[in-house]
Image: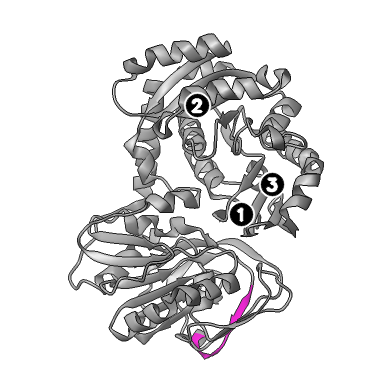
Amino acid sequence: MLQGTGSDVGKSVLVAGLCRIARRRGIPVAPFKPQNMSNNAAACAQRGEIGRAQALQARAAGIAPTTDMNPVLLKPEGDRRAQLVVNGAVVESAEAAGYMARRGSLLPDVLAAFERLRARHGLIIVEGAGSPAEVNLRRGDIANMGFARAADVPVILVGDIDRGGVIASLVGTKAVIDAGDAAMIAGFAINRFRGDPALFDDGVRFIEDRCGWRCFGVVPWLRSARALPAEDAVVLDHAAAGRDGIVIAVPMLSRISNFDDLDPLRAEADVDVRFIPPGRPIPREADAIILAGTKSTLTDIAMMRAEGWDHDILAAYRTGAHIVGLCGGFQMLGTRVTDPDGRDGTGGTADALGLLAMETAMSGAKIVRPVSGRTTAHGDALTGYEIHTGRSSGPALSNPFCVLNDGTQDGAFAAEGRIIGTYLHGVFASDAFRARWLSGMREGRVSALDYEAGVDRALDMLADGLEAALDIDALFALAR
């Protein structure tokens, strides 16, 4: 199990790399994360959802994602409220204090999922959440040491040297956790080192002497990790391409979800994807504006209006920009959204952008499924997934964006393709559609990018980097 000295120390990427290494060594491996908090979710074949990071780790392992890989998923709906997903299915929306008080009751579900994975795979690589040093959260913990001790899983503690204070964070963790938890830690690893690792030899010895743990390696800053989908919205704070070419603006909605939908566009050499933070207008030079998914459509409609982005979007459309809405962003392109029971976070009714003649009502069971199909305009193949609450209806849907392989229609296609709305996540990973859509903004443009192959290359490069930096044999020998 990899635990971190804090959030965003690179645990998800390290687990993915270790899964790819195990796969290349012929070890049947699977990832596992007991509890995840993220609005980036993936649909599994059995109609359940898990964190996107675990889906990427499963891909690295060469297996299909299942709900057993992430039995507890929390999807924030507000600062103090989240949707609780257990074994892939929505259970309820819970206040943070209430969930924290009873999360320990979910440990049997977590352990049962873990045991099902263990029965099918020779090696399980577990990812913790947050940090075991958050001792105020230790009671009832199912994400870090609470799970490690219940399942008897040895722990490697990961520290991020790039953020500074890595010696203090590792030594400090040993100082604040109790002896039983500390006994689970078999060693540590340093992540994201820039420069000559030998310069940190004295630091490694200091940590080993103070903690009594061995170092399993110092991982350099691996550029291959930048080509992999990110799990946490914190990365959007640093997302700026700054390249010449096609400019695509993405408003950073307060409940933005599945923003890795934009990764294939960011991988294009001549595309500048700009995530627009609150307090800044959408740039007038934008060739396209994409409204990404959101965990709470009504909340983000209110934010969009408060920021004045609704005026920016409508003005951009009138002056020739392309507008795309994905999932919740698709709902925001219609005339009205209603959610009387607060199924999608905030309850109520709101007027939307009015670019598509349709209304959305948050009703019925949540739809979670992988899908494939073809665009209606040109027959380009699409592969993606649906995760949404709400049903849309109206004249705009009579000209759908695509037809799925089961015969159902999805989305809307209007203004000769300058407006596209769809419930499908992942459509931009389909190379033919992405290339055609971009060529609509730059006539004659040709793309040679094979996005999915690029992700697999990045996973292999990540594995190569970890093989060189870590004592993999000793790490895998810890498994019991």
First in sequence: mark 3 vs mark 1? 1
- Relative to residue 265, is residue 461 depicted above or below? above
Quadrant housing the C terminus: top right
Q: How many marks?
A: 3
- Relative to residue 440, is residue 89 depicted above or below? above
Residue 8 in magenta stretch: no
First in sequence: mark 2 vs mark 1? 2
First in sequence: mark 3 vs mark 2? 2
Residues tagged 2 and 1 counted as in contact (Cβ below 8 A)? no
Q: Residues within 10 Å of mark 3 (few under 14, many from 20)?
A: many
Q: Amino acid at mark 2?
A: Gly
In the rendered image, is residue 295 in sight? Answer: yes
Q: Which residues are magenta?
A: 390-396
* Numbered circle sitting on residue 26: 2
Q: Residues within 10 Å of mark 1 (few under 14, many from 20)?
A: some
| SS at mark 1 in the image | loop
Q: State left or right for residue 151 relative to residue 76.
A: right
Q: Amino acid at mark 3?
A: Val
Q: State left or right for residue 281 relative to residue 76.
A: left
Task: Name the residue that disc number 3 marks.
Answer: 72
Residue furthest left in the image: 444
The picture places residue 139, in percent across and down from the top left corner, at 77, 35
Q: Nearer the viewer, residue 96 or 85?
A: 96
Q: Amino acid at mark 1?
A: Ala
Task: Name the residue that disc number 1 marks.
Answer: 45
Residue at 55%, 35% in the rendered image = 6
Q: Residues within 10 Å of mark 2 (few under 14, many from 20)?
A: few
Residues tagged 3 and 1 counted as in contact (Cβ below 8 A)? no
